[in-house]
Amino acid sequence: MTVPAGGYDPSFYELLYAAEDQHFWFRSRNAVIAAMVSQAVAGLAPGYRVLELGCGNGNVTRLLQATCSEGLVIGMDLFGEGLRNARRRGVTQLVQADVNRAPFQKKFQVIGMFDVLEHIPDDGRSCVKHSISWTLGVHSFLLCPHTRNSGATSTKLPSTAGDTHSPI
């Protein structure tokens, strides 16, 4: 598979896989994610659905499985290389798909995108598309790195209300 301009290079999966369990940055970030997600799912009825968009090697997805034991956790990634590593980590529900063409029809109560948005060539379009499914009652987590000179732009997300959901 070719890497889209501005996209992710799947050759990095093995290097990340070797570092993710031991490196302080990944461990600290996972502790923060676990604390935030634990609070979000505390009031949800068993059987809730959790989706991690761009799950890569399954480092966070494995954490979500442990944190969200009363729900169904699904990891989704564009690249098979990452999904193979996620399986090695014990992640059980995986889907290979593009974040802009997610194949889901049922609603998710928790959606996470952790350090993925910066690898999507048209990240503004992706945010607008997903904001339609990120409506009231859905816990959304979006983490992305930022540097002072990142050249980041701001995209105003459309307001959504009610219980309308896109196919995600």
Image: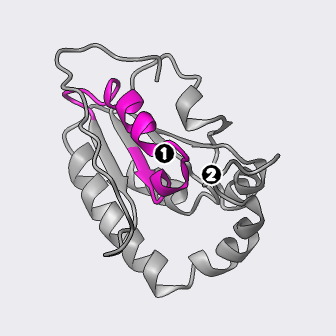
The numbered dot on residue 91 is 2
Please state the horizontal and vertical placement of residue 163, each as a whole percent of the image: 23, 14
Kindly identify the amino acid type of the residue bearing the numbered disc 2: Val
On whether residue 130 falls in the magenta region, the answer is: yes
Question: Residue 82 at what x, y percent from top left?
Answer: 70, 56
119 lies left or right of 147? right
Q: Residue under circle 1?
A: 52
**Residue 65 position (above or below residue 33):** above
Decide if residue 15 is on the left or right side of residue 36: right
Q: Give the range drawn in magenta.
A: 112-138
Q: In this view, does 18 lie above or below 44?
A: below
* Of 110 and 117, the residue lying toward us: 117
Residue at 71% x, 53% y: name it: 87
The answer, for residue 150, to whether it is visible in the render is yes
Q: The residue tagged with tag 1: helix, strand or loop?
A: strand
User: As rendered, which of 152 and 68 lies closer to the eye?
Assistant: 152
Q: Give the x, y percent position of residue 33.
A: 34, 62
Q: What residue type is labelled 1?
A: Glu
Does 137 appear in magenta? yes
Residue visible at 78% across and 65% down in the picture: 11
- At 48% from the left and 45% from the top, the residue drawn is 52
Q: Which mark is residue 26?
A: none
Q: How is the image coloured?
A: one colour
* Residue 85, above or below 47: below
Find residue 12 and report its image quarter.
bottom right
SS for callout 2 = loop
Neighbours of disc 2 within 10 Å: few (<14), some (14-19), many (20+)? many
